[in-house]
Amino acid sequence: MYRRQFLGSAAAVGLLPGVGLARTAPQVLRAAPHRQQILPAEYPDTELWSFDATFPGRILRATQGDRVSIEVENQLPQATAVHWHGLRLDNAMDGVPGLTQAPIAPGDRFAYEFTLPDAGTYWYHSHAQSMEQVERGLYGPLIIDETEPPDVDQDLVLVLDDIRLERDGSVSGFDNFHDLSHAGRIGNLWLSNGQIDPGYPVKRGERLRLRLISAANARVFTLGLQGFEGWVVALDGMPLAAPEPLGEELTLAPAQRMDLIVDVTTDDEEAFLITFERDGGYAITHFPVGGPSRARRDAPSALPPNPEFPIDLANARTATLLVEGGAMGGMRAAEVDGERLVARELAGRGLFWALNGIAGRPETPLLDLSRGESVRVGMANDTAFPHAMHLHGMHFAEVLPDGSLGPLRDTILLNPQETREIAFQAHNPGNWLFHCHMLAHHQAGMGTWIRVSA
Ligand code: C2O
Ligand code: CU
């Protein structure tokens, strides 16, 4: 049914270290190179770039409504900036170099300070040269607790990634034109919390909250749980109106999150989180089962809703977004900084994708909205690859074929040749990036932005 990635791999058992974000004292988050054993012990270790010398970065944890200060210190050989993915925060704190702040130069610091309006599962990551910086390890979970969290025995954060490592343990090859023009940087090793198939002990009958976060550069995970029964309770941090029973497969695109509440129901000695690949399922995390523990029979209730910003579909402005480019895509030309370039010239600048005929972040926004206005954006993927479109600063809902609204999300998967429409209320003023979270695609041109005036 599934297999291990390495026979006899020495996967360490352990939880991610966490740190509570204090209301007053600023936390310092230091971005710097550090070495960690990723491959099994008989292979060399890996030089990563990480926050506070842990990979993934430690769990930053606070309670809904808190105000937090985090000072990022850059000890990397490149400029950086940190984005707090999925938070509906002040625009100036959004961490996008060239749009919301100047990049943090090597040796410099930047003080982020913001209020946390929403509870849920979020993450933080570098937003500078992110295809390289996120791949090298600059990411971590950001967990905002409800003031009254649901009743579970364990709250477990699983940050999933697929890293591409060489046999000597190194992370390299960031100027690969194949990655830029095809699916993106797909890895060769699945990691859960930075480890190959780590084990988290559970008890039979126990109820867990599993917070799945995809930090993958480009891979769309198809996941399965074996040994559990349960519900999906939140997507991209936002609670579902009603818990939804788990299906056979869960799709998790880059940057997406999924909160599950599951009961350990197996009679076996291990339960699994599996990634389904072309050649079968692989254990990405296993759970040694002990116990028994007190079992619950009741379904969980919905998580308390976050503040709502209703979408007025009937009076919404409309826009369209045409996604073009990539290998086998047939894009002939696109505009860059107001200049029209043919495909060969675009490739010469490392650009392979365009949104509405423009490659790279345009000078003028896709939409200029007033605060409180509703908008619908129809997106058409005229390429041979999937894209995970992410809007900063506000969550959107999908407008479903029957005209109803789907759950709130901040990242939506657009499969090849697919058309989808999203809608949101422009409630958060500022300049917000709207881009593909396949990080190679973003680097190679797939990003625009939206302005919301106060
Ligand atoms: Cu997760 Cu523009 O970012
Ligand atoms: Cu893309």
Image (spheres, grey):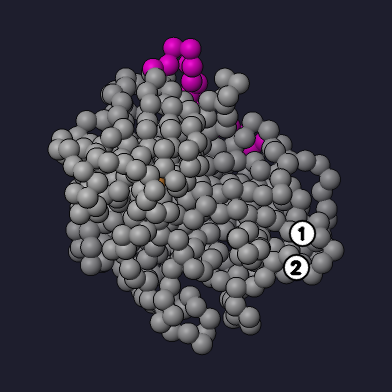
Q: Say whether disc 1 or disc 2 marks the residue closer to the N-terminus.
A: 1
Which is nearer the eye, 416 or 274?
A: 416
Residue 433 rendering spot, x and y as whole percentages: 32, 38
333 versus 428 height, above or below: below
For label 1, the SS is: loop
Which is nearer the eye, 377 or 10?
A: 377
Along the horizontal axis of the image, is 210 left or right of 180?
right
Which is nearer the eye, 328 or 9?
A: 328
Question: Residue 197: within the magenta?
Answer: no
User: What secondary structure prevails in the magenta region?
Assistant: loop
Residue depicted at x 44% and y 12% = 315
429 versus 63 height, above or below: above
* Residue 199, picture quadrant: bottom right
Name the amino acid type tagged 1. Gly
Residue 373 rendering spot, x and y as whole percentages: 38, 18
Find the magenta span and give its range. Answer: 302-317
Along the horizontal axis of the image, is 64 left or right of 10?
left
Which is nearer the eye, 40 or 378?
A: 378
Q: Quadrant of the N terminus?
A: bottom right
Q: Which mark is residue 270?
A: 2
Residue depicted at x 51% and y 87% = 42
Residue named by callout 1: 227
Residue 347 rendering spot, x and y as whole percentages: 24, 52
Question: Residue 312: within the magenta?
Answer: yes
Instruction: Classify mark 2: residues with Cα within 10 Å, few (<14), some (14-19) or many (20+).
Output: some
Residue depicted at x 45% and y 61% = 186
Q: Are marks 1 and 2 in contact (CB under 8 Å)?
A: yes
Res 170 seen here: yes
* Residue 104, picture quadrant: bottom left
For label 2, the SS is: strand
Res 28 seen here: no
